Image (tube, rainbow, N blue to C red):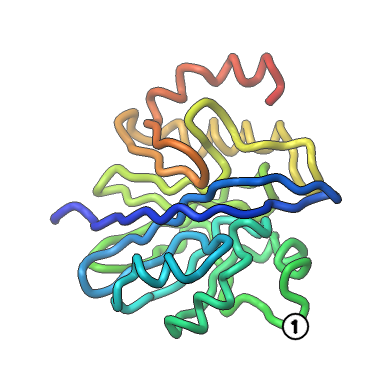
Amino acid sequence: MTAPRIDRVVTSGIFSLDGEDFEVDNNIWIVGDDDEVVVVDAAHDHRPIVAGIAGRRVVAVVCTHGHNDHINVAAALADEVLAPIWLHPDDTMLWGSVYEDRRPDAALADGQVVAVGGRRLEVVHTPGHSPGGCCLHDREAAVLFSGDTLFNGGPGATGRSFSDFATIIDSIRNRLLPLPAATIVHTGHGDDTRIGDEAAHLDEWVARGH
C-alpha cells in the first residue's frame, strides 16, 4: 500500500478555558488520498482548511477532543464540505460550551476504524487532557495523529477543568508508548515527533508532574 497523503494546515486563534484566553497555533491534518480525506480537527478559520481539502470528498471532520480551539470552526467546515462531525461523547460538555444548539453527528469510540482513501485509521481513546481525548493511528503507515495527548516534549497540559495528569500519563504509557518506536507523531500544536523519542522521557514527565 502506498503512503497516505497527509496535508497540514496551520491556523491561529484563541484557546479559552476556565476564564483564561491563550493565543495558539493549531495543526489541522488532512489525511487520505487524491479523492477523499478525513480532516483531523477544525480550528479558528475554516477557509484555509477548505483550500487544503482542494475539492476532495470529506469522509468526516474528526475532532480529537472538545476544546474550543479544536472545534470552533467544525460546524462551518462541515457545512461547507457537506461532511459529518465526529467527537467522543465524553467531551460533550466541552462541545456544548461552543455550540449550544448543535450536536456532533456521530460518536467516536475506542477501537473504531475510520476508512479513508484506502487507509485504516484506528481511534485510540486517550483521556487525560480531556475526558474524551482521542488519537488516530494508521498502523500500516506507522503514523499517529495525537491531538493534544502527546507532543514533542511531553504530554498535553493538565491542571484545568476536566483534565488529569495521572490519567494522561496512563493513556500515554499504556496506549501510545507501546506503538513501534519509529511511529511518526503528528501533533495538535507544534512539531512532529516519534514514539521512541518521547518514550525515553516518560519518567522525567512523571517526576516533574506535567
Q: Split into 4 quadrants, where in the image is the N terminus? A: bottom left
Residue 180 location in percent, x, y?
A: 33, 33
Q: Quadrant of residue 36?
A: bottom left
Q: Residue furthest right?
A: 19
Viewer-proximal residue among 37 and 107: 37
Residue 142 location in percent, x, y?
A: 29, 42
Viewer-proximal residue among 159 and 15: 15
Q: In percent of the image, x 42 and y 81: which residue is there?
A: 81
- The answer to whether residue 198 is left or right of residue 86 is left
Residue 7 location in percent, x, y?
A: 32, 56
Task: Tell me the kind of residue under disc 1.
Answer: Asp
Viewer-proximal residue among 144 and 152: 152
Up the image or down, 120 lies above or below 176; here it is below
Q: In percent of the image, x 75 and y 53: which residue is there?
A: 16
Residue 19 location in percent, x, y?
A: 85, 50
Q: Which residue is mark 1?
A: 101
- The answer to whether residue 205 is left or right of residue 31 is right
Up the image or down, 57 lies above or below 116; here it is below
